[in-house]
Amino acid sequence: MKRLFKSLLVLVVLVVLASCGARQNGQLIGVLDRPSWKGINPYGMVYVPSGTLHIGPSDQDVSNTFVQRSKTISIQGFYMDDTEITNNEYRQFVYWVRDSIAHTLLDHIYEDDDGNEFVDWEYEIDWEDETLDELYYQGDEKFAGKKELNVSKLEYEYQWYDWQRAAHDKSGASRTSFIKNEKSLIYPDTLVWVRDFAYSYNEPMTRNYFWHPAFDDYPVVGVNWHQANAFSYWRTKLWNSYQGGVNTEDFRLPTEHEWEYAARGGHDLAPFPWGGYYIRNAKGCLLANFKPGRGNYPEDGGLYTVKADAYFPNDYGLYNMAGNVAEWTSSSYHEGAYSFLHDLNPDLRYDAKEDDAEAQKRKVIRGGSWKDIMFRLQTGTRHYEFQDTTKSYVGFRCALTFLGRSLNDF
């Protein structure tokens, strides 16, 4: 009986193998069980097609011609957030970190078959549980008897892969040496509203800007370059955990020249995102949120920041690519970078350590802000901030590399 069973099993296997061979007919047709791919459409993002861009100083920026060579470059297509990341969007990240810490303290944890531990989000959090007291200010740290979250407890650990080092390694180093683990406090530095301005009363902004619902749709500020990267990593994990199937590229900060290319909205050499040479329209209305004149902040309709979708978008559908808040990019700042950058997807990357010189910690910011003069708003103007600093006028938006030739192919 056993011998008969084995014979039948062998016969079944041979039939299956024969059917596979018959299906391919001996031809080279590739693997047939590949997942389908029809592209993605991330919420709140717009598609920026591949194209070319002329970078370098404008004819009005003569002094920078010595450190900014004119150059023609090509940029791969990508998605970009149509607005700067808002307070309420960033608050989703803050609340996720807060809740994950609370679940961990309450032992709402489960293990998978491989022994990996995960937060069990099915549990309800009892915020009155004494176990969570350590998340709040205690004793003398309390102000006016309020129960307030101790934001120094909100720390997020994320990873990044050193592709440059891995590509140039000739020593056969293990993969773990290219995987970098970082920890970052993720709550915005609300004190920037006081620190950035001497002899100026901005305490109401410190108390309310990130917390109050009046500012939910305003761009988040007070986040440094590391916090922007932590947010992008979390956003990628969030996307992948719910989408399933084929993972996409990671959400990330745009490179300096992706940002410039997107800001021009398809108009090469355009000095402003709207394509024109002037900061006012034909009716004399200002087209962005910046500092017109001397101290006349509200003339453009906003005293500080304005809503992230204020004013008209450029021809790619991107809002406030000039003014409102300057924006972090992934690129390191070097005055003469244009002289040696590649012309295909150029990007100068340097991952500065804590003990590196301050000059090596400079990251490019673009777009100008609500407190800047018109010069900073031009699409070709470069500036920088240090990667570990926070400012009341610097925010960010994310990019996502497009996989394929063109959106029209799907």
Image (cartoon, rainbow, N blue to C red):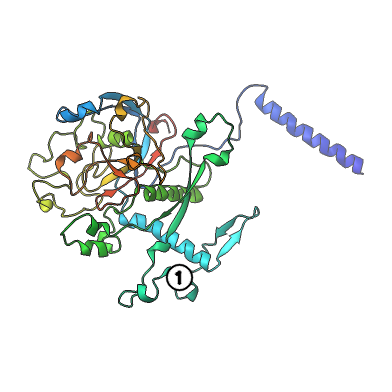
Q: Is residue 15 visible?
A: yes
Q: Is residue 147 visible?
A: no
**Residue reaching furthest to the bottom:** 145
- Residue 2 x, y percent position in the rendering: 90, 43
In the rendered view, does 240 fall on the left or right side of 30? left
In the image, 197 versus 52, the foreground residue is 197
Q: Nearer the viewer, residue 202 or 273?
A: 202
**Residue located 45% across and 63% down the image:** 99
Label tally? 1
Q: Is residue 241 above or below residue 194?
A: above
Q: Quadrant of the N terminus?
A: top right
Residue count near mark 1 (Cα–Cα under 10 Å), binned few <14, some 14–19, many ≥20: few
Q: Is residue 320 above or below residue 143?
A: above
Locate residue 72: give its quadrant.
top left
Q: Would you name the residue on which mark 1 appears?
A: 134
What residue is rendered at 82% in x and 35% in y?
Answer: 10
Residue lying at the far top of the rendered structure: 27
From the viewer's perspective, tell me whether residue 335 is left or right of residue 297. right
Quadrant of the snapshot with the C terminus: top left
Q: Residue 108: image x %, image y %?
A: 55, 65
Q: Find residue 271 and report its horizontal and vertical position in percent.
A: 19, 33
Give percent across and percent down for residue 321.
Answer: 25, 42
Locate residue 319: give its quadrant.
top left
Amino acid tagged 1: Glu
Could you tell me which secondary element the residue under label 1 belongs to? Answer: helix
Q: For this view, does 260 lie left or right of residue 407? A: left
The quarter of the picture where residue 397 lies is: top left
